[in-house]
């Protein structure tokens, strides 16, 4: 990132005045410098040892900036928040290939974070913002919106980077929700249903579910769940609202529990 105006805009959009900021992927420290002008403290995370050495030299005279040599994809957020005695604001200009795992790692740690501001390839960002009926609505849309309030903050063109990529980028702000947007009985089942549904997105949602619950008597469970949830199995996944996914997940969960209890009862006789 070489565009000073964009760097300043990102730092301001973090809304980190007087706060503790954790920057992911500090690189050569261009964004770090902008954040340090606004935040009370900046913890700059960088996994590359050589870059970490350069960063320590660059900010050796700045007591506001701490360099943490660590992998953002496996950072222990609860321990870091305890050490900082604050739920930090997270900011990152991430390598595109690492963006998804880092994002889901942040979602898992949302109880320890205030908000996060991240840059993504524009196509990926639009998938997170998409709603039902959109051709970009998918697993990423549902899982991100289930746990966060997400909004577009800034669009960034290729000329802001050196070397310039062949794609546009977009900065998104995520605010963790106190509780999932759709209340469900089991979050793991909700994710299983969403992933199964979009696994064959050009086919009916019933076919997607059968790819997971289609062995033997389980195929009957899919039809029973669709009926219990009052949803149309002939629709495609992108036509389903989050609430409909929630009802379907709850129905499948209840049927699984019912069958397990019946099996346990039969085994005890």
Image (cartoon, rainbow, N blue to C red):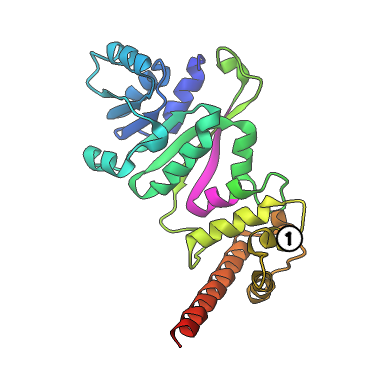
Give whichever of 46, 9 is nearer the camera: 46
Q: Label 1: which residue?
A: 207
**Could you tell me if residue 37 is visible in this image?**
no
- Decide if residue 191 is in sight here: yes
Residue at 65% x, 34% y is 123
Q: Which residue is drawn at 37% across and 21% down?
A: 32
Task: Say whether residue 7 is magenta.
Answer: no
Residue 198 locus on image (x, y percent): 67, 52
Q: Is residue 10 above or below residue 223?
A: above
Q: In which quarter of the image is residue 206?
A: bottom right
| Residue located at (61% from left, 62% from top) | 245
Compared with 210, 12 (above or below) is above
**Which stretch did the figure color magenta?**
142-155
Q: Residue 144 appears at what percent x and percent y?
A: 53, 48
Q: Please identify the quarter of the rendering in which residue 192 is found.
A: bottom right
Helix, strand or loop at label 1? It is helix
């Amino acid at each position: 990132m070489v565009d000073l105006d964009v760097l300043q805009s990102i730092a301001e959009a973090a809304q980190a005045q007087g706060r503790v900021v954790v920057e992911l992927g500090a690189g050569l420290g261009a964004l770090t410098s902008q954040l340090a002008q606004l935040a009370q403290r900046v913890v700059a995370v960088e996994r590359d040892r050589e870059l970490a050495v350069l960063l320590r030299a660059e900010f050796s005279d700045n007591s506001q900036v701490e360099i943490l040599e660590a992998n953002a994809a496996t950072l222990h957020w609860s321990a870091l928040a305890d050490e900082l005695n604050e739920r930090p604001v997270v900011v990152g200009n991430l390598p595109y290939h690492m963006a998804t795992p880092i994002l889901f790692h942040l979602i898992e740690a949302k109880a320890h974070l205030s908000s996060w501001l991240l840059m993504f390839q524009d196509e990926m960002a639009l998938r997170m913002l998409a709603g039902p009926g959109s051709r970009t609505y998918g697993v990423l849309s549902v899982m991100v919106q289930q746990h966060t309030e997400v909004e577009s903050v800034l669009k960034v063109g290729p000329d802001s980077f050196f070397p310039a990529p062949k794609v546009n980028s977009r900065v998104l702000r995520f605010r963790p929700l106190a509780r999932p947007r759709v209340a469900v009985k089991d979050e793991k089942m909700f994710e299983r249903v969403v992933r199964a549904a979009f696994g064959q997105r050009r086919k009916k949602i019933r076919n997607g579910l059968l790819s997971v619950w289609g062995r033997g008597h389980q195929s009957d469970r899919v039809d029973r769940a669709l009926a219990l949830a009052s949803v149309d199995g002939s629709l495609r996944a992108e036509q389903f609202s989050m609430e409909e996914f929630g009802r379907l997940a709850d129905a499948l969960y209840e049927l699984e529990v019912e069958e397990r209890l019946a099996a346990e009862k039969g085994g005890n006789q």
